[in-house]
Amino acid sequence: MPVPSEKSDLAVPSDHSPVRRRLAAQYVRDARDRLTSTTGTRPVFDLELLRNYAQNRLSASLVILLLVCTVGFLSSLWTGAVMAGAWTASVLLIHAVIMHKCRQFLAETPNEQDTRKWRMRFVILDLFQGLAWMFVLINPVGLDESSGTFMLFVMLLVVAVASMTSSSLPMAVLVATIPVTFAVALDFLLHASLRNYILAGMAVTAQGYFSLLAYRLYSTTLATLIARAEKDALIGELEQAKAISDEARGQAEAANIAKSRFLAQMSHELRTPLNAILGFSEVMKSEVFGPHAVPAYKEYSSDIHNSGVHLLGLINEILDLSRIEAGRYELNEGSVSLTAVVEDCHHLLKLRASNRGIAIHDSFEPDLPNLWADERAVRQVCLNLLSNAIKFTPQGGEIWLKVGWTASGGQYMTCKDSGAGIPEEEIPVVLSSFGQGSNSIKSAEQGAGLGLPIAKSLIEMHGGTFTLRSKLRIGTEVICTFPPERVVAAMAPVNQAPPIQPHQDEAARAERHNVLKRPLFRAGT
């Protein structure tokens, strides 16, 4: 047990932590059990200790039987055959009753009241057995050296066996051994001599030693039961937590399936009228059927078309993210030039950057081999990164696009801007679904917060890494790497059939010519 004055190195759990609540509940339960128990332990421990006692007595029944027969035979040399036989029969009868009661106890499932009765029965039976052993050690004729040595030897055997077999019931150990020790010590003291005094002291000392040993065995058995009970309680808590976790997982899976069905249905329900809105608004914006009577209608049509395009892009992003999270996004892989994809994205968004006064610089390492990747996914990653850089870079800012080799033999793509930057504590937020940083909220161009999470997920699906570095008032840099296994030049070549040699080709043509000239049927067939 820990000393109260010592300081524990472990952190003390908070008042509202599950560990503190579990310890408090266990303390209250232990205190209630001690108050309701007659031995100061839990009632369930009392029952287990009695079971251990009964099992020990049954397992040692043969040893006790041999001991009784041996002592009865040897005691006949001092007390006579009749008295020794009567004593042996009485002890064997008590032993048989104890064995019968032990078997009866193990066959039943007693409650708390029955446990107290059984404990009292076992204590009384051990008391009778101790008194029986005491009678054989009282010498009615007189005490000589040989009989004194025999009495001390028998006492030690009886006390040792009782301490081992009845250690789970300390009261039974005492009532079974104290009468024997008392009888032997009293006989030695009544025949006053220095030798007898020494033997009496040895008898009392042996009684104390075996009593202490029995108590140690009892403490060990009780500690084992407590440890087993705590282990069972922990296993029960783990099973309960697992059941709760399985139920929560089932609910989450059901919610995920419902979300996927909802998104699939809503995507169809939204895209159908949205396509009509986009089509008609584009016709009205382009004045296909003639100019508008009111010029403002053309501007309204353009606003409607732009809003529809924005809404369609948002729906597509939500659907992509839901497929990625559900693990149903399939990569259509092929040989892709990372440099060509980044150049296309650069040219596609160059006009938008120029309108905002932002310069885009690119730097590509020459002679880069192709990647085995999904071109649409790689293009979407690059467009998302470049669009975010343009959106959050102020007028007059700069953006750098780089493509090259990694140190491990893979390829990387970086997009760096000179924008306002992202606080370090907000980086996990912007990488989460629908997460937006403080600069995005303050900005006039707010998005749905899906560009970076989709880009990160697509890169990770390719086995690469997605790293975002940012500093306030300096800028943001995103580094996407592809592993060496994705480089086409590093892939294992496909086994091809060996080319046909010219002489083999001529031999094959001659064989085919001979086959064609053979008749279908031979004479006589």
Image: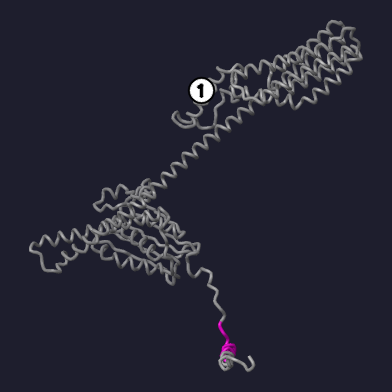
Q: Quadrant of the C terminus?
A: bottom right
Which of the 4 image quadrants contains residue 48?
top right
| Dominant SS type (magenta) | helix
Circle 1 — which element?
helix
In terms of depth relative to the viewer, which is nearer, 354 or 82? 82
Q: Position of residue 442 (x, y in %)?
A: 26, 48
Can the viewer see residue 119? Answer: yes
- Going by the image, does 346 lie left or right of 333? left
Q: Position of residue 416 (x, y in %)?
A: 36, 59
Kind of residue sitting beneath label 1: Val
Where 412 falls versus 263 (above or below)? below
Magenta part of the protein: which range? Answer: 499-509
- Outermost residue, left side: 293
- Going by the image, does 478 lie left or right of 56? left
On whether residue 507 falls in the magenta region, the answer is yes
Q: Position of residue 446 (x, y in %)?
A: 27, 52
The residue located at (52%, 23%) in the rendering is: 29
Q: Quadrant of the N terminus?
A: top right
The residue located at (72%, 16%) in the rendering is: 125
Where 434 falls versus 5 (above or below)? below
On whether residue 247 falls in the magenta region, the answer is no
On the image, numbered disc 1 is attached to which residue? 28
- Going by the image, does 463 lie left or right of 90? left
Which of the 4 image quadrants contains residue 396?
bottom left
Can the viewer see residue 474? Answer: no
Q: Position of residue 103 (x, y in %)?
A: 70, 24
